[in-house]
């Protein structure tokens, strides 16, 4: 009898919860529908015909169902949407390019209000200062193109042209020119942000300085909705050389060792990424000078590897040509292919030393045993250092936690969808990933509780994720969170928690 009563009570409580939640969602939607805003602002709700495409991020290994997705055309409309969410206590997920590894641009759970900034595409360039004003919905490919056309400028950032500036700039931003110009986040000089009350705030070294520190490295989704960035851009060098070398898998030790030992002390003009997959090793170098200088500089690296590459491809050209090449797509940079989605489980670790032979063997052995159900398994080695430790703009940032890192690993597994349904898990792939991560974590100095990782390759299962991403900045971030969003409206499974 007691058990039965308990069951009845718990069913009733569950139903009450759903009723309340459903009512809150209905209230939220009518509030959003009532925004008397710009006619170009639009709303997608669960009954919309576009709901099931609009709610997809790049990684379709998630099937989160937002309560609604709002696409404001103006900052005022975005502010009104935040006020609707605040009124009914609905979590807000800002979304820019939707490339979060864990679907956090969709909230990382059901029921969030996604505020998608894709209509914020403004761009202008102050030719005097080289500071670019950039709408928070801009994707990297179009951004590189706009900067180039504004006078052959560049900013450091990633290779994938469909990644959104919102996520990448607030979490770091590492790529082809980072050893020369630092991480993208360190070049931010100002931002416009809407806080949890829908109030506009200008964020800079002198205006909201605590937020200026926090947003540059820990800003994605935790403190407010960034609508615009002001970023220091740099004149592109006149010649850029792209170099691609392929190596046989059997020489993985020589390749990893030769690349990382050279890369650690390479000139800042050098950026290298070595991707190791179960079928090939590819070493990519972006060198900010002519091919003859690039060839001369990397010669000791090739000698150190000591194995004849299966192929090599060295091309000298402009910065924008190099960016198009690294995009890995035949689409023009300003028109990235947004139809590409992946089933993906990935993560990262960063190191203040190079890998041991045992760790290299661990990587190789794991790639070798990837499950048949997977499409690919990869580890990408990236050399950090250079100006990432001494960025041109030296204003302290939450991202400084990673100063002194020499090597970043970015790893993952992808699989095909047998049914074309989103949220289809490949159990063998997830198991592979868990085992691989466990072996790497166990070998990390200090073990699985002392990991350091790059927050833009965010990963749900990372044992000590807060410290891994933010180090001794955690308590300061929590205080700032409390000061700006004490009701925790901007929340997702790995947002900065309240103190
Ligand atoms: C294929 C691929 C390639 C990548 N390559 C690189 C690379 O070369 N270098 C690199 O450094 N990283 C790279 N990344 C990682 C990338 O930087 C992160 O996934 C980044 O968070 C994606 O940003 P987004 O805006 O596209 O994603 P979203 O999913 O839209 O956002 C990511 C997070 O930021 C928050 N956010 C987004 N916009 C805003 C905003 N306007 N205001 C406040 N919070 C916001 C979201 O709420 C979410 O928590 C890559 C990722 C993928 C999938
Ligand atoms: C808002 O909702 C969260 C859970 O989603 C809850 O923990 C919190 O107490 C709520 N806040 C208010 C003010 O109702
Ligand atoms: C650079 O090296 C490649 C071989 O790796 C060669 O094909 C190319 O001609 C060289 N370019 C210059 C300018 O030396
Ligand atoms: C799955 O999608 C692909 C391409 O998107 C399509 O060619 C194929 O027919 C689809 N399969 C099913 C079972 O719907």
Image (cartoon, helix red, strand yellow):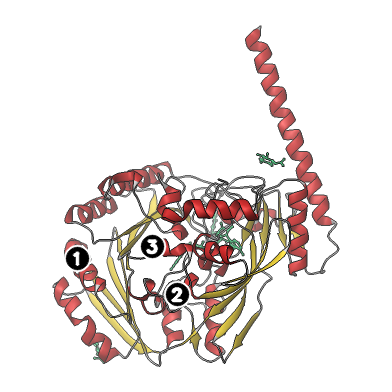
Q: Where residue 499 is drawn, which disc sits there?
A: none
Q: Which marked residue is nearer to the observer: mark 3 or mark 2?
A: 2
Picture quadrant where residue 41 is located: bottom right
- Name, please, the residue furthest toward the top: 1
Q: Quadrant of the C terminus?
A: top right
Q: In front here: 310 or 227? A: 227
Mark 3 → mark 1, Cα distance in angstroms? 22 Å
Q: Where residue 394 is drawn, which disc sits there?
A: 2
Q: Is residue 469 left or right of residue 497?
A: left
Q: Position of residue 69 (x, y in %)?
A: 70, 56
Mark 2 → mark 1, Cα distance in angstroms? 32 Å
Which residue in the structure is indicated by mark 1?
257
Picture quadrant where residue 339 is located: bottom right
Visible in this render: residue 346? no
At 66% across and 58% down in the image, what residue appears?
54
Assess disc 2: are there few (<14), some (14-19) or many (≥20) residues with their C-alpha within 10 Å of its C-alpha: few
Q: Which marked residue is nearer to the observer: mark 3 or mark 1?
A: 3
Q: Position of residue 173 (x, y in %)?
A: 46, 69
Q: Where residue 402 is drawn, which disc sits there?
A: 3
Label 1 sits on a secondary structure element that is helix
Mark 3 → mark 2, Cα distance in angstroms? 14 Å
């Amino acid at each position: 009898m007691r058990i039965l009563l308990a069951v009845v009570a718990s069913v009733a409580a569950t139903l009450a919860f759903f009723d309340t939640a459903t009512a809150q969602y209905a209230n939220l939607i009518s509030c959003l529908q009532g925004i008397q805003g710009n006619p170009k602002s639009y709303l997608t709700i669960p009954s919309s015909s576009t709901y099931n495409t609009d709610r997809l991020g790049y990684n379709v290994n998630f099937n989160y169902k937002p309560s609604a997705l709002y696409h404001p055309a103006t900052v005022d409309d975005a502010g009104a949407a935040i006020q609707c969410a605040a009124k009914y206590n609905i979590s807000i997920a800002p979304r820019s390019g939707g490339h979060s590894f864990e679907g956090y641009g969709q909230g990382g759970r059901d029921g969030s209000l996604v505020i998608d900034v894709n209509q914020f595409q403004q761009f202008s360039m102050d030719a005097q200062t080289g500071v670019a004003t950039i709408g928070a919905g801009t994707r990297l490919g179009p951004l590189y193109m706009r900067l180039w056309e504004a006078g052959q400028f560049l900013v450091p950032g990633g290779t994938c042209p469909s990644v959104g500036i919102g996520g990448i700039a607030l979490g770091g931003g590492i790529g082809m020119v980072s050893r020369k110009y630092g991480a993208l986040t360190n070049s931010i000089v100002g931002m416009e942000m809407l806080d949890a009350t829908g109030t506009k705030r200008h964020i800079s070294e002198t205006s909201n300085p605590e937020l200026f520190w926090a947003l540059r490295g820990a800003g994605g989704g935790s403190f407010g909705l960034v609508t615009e960035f002001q970023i220091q851009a740099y004149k592109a060098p006149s010649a850029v050389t792209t170099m691609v070398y392929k190596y046989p898998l059997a020489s993985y030790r020589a390749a990893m060792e030769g690349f990382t030992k050279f890369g650690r002390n390479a000139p800042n003009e050098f950026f290298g990424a070595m991707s190791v997959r179960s079928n090939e090793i590819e070493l990519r170098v972006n060198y900010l000078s002519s091919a003859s200088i690039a060839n001369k500089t990397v010669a000791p690296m090739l000698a150190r590897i000591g194995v004849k590459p299966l192929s090599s491809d060295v091309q000298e050209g402009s910065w924008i040509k190099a960016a198009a090449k690294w995009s890995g797509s035949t689409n023009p940079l300003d028109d990235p292919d947004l139809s590409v989605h992946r089933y993906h489980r990935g993560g990262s670790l960063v190191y203040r030393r190079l890998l041991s032979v045992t760790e290299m063997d661990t990587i190789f052995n794991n790639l070798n045993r990837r499950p048949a159900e997977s499409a690919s398994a990869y580890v990408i080695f990236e050399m950090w250092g250079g100006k990432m430790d001494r960025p041109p703009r030296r204003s302290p940032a939450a991202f400084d936690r990673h100063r002194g890192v020499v090597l970043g690993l970015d790893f993952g597994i992808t699989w095909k969808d047998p049914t074309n349904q989103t949220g289809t898990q490949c159990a063998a792939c997830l198991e592979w990933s868990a085992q691989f991560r466990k072996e790497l974590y166990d070998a990390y100095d200090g073990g699985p509780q002392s990991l350091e990782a790059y927050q833009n390759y965010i990963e749900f299962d990372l044992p000590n994720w807060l410290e891994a991403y933010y180090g001794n900045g955690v308590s300061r971030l929590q205080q700032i969170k409390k000061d700006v969003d004490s009701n925790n409206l901007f929340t997702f499974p790995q947002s900065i928690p309240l103190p």
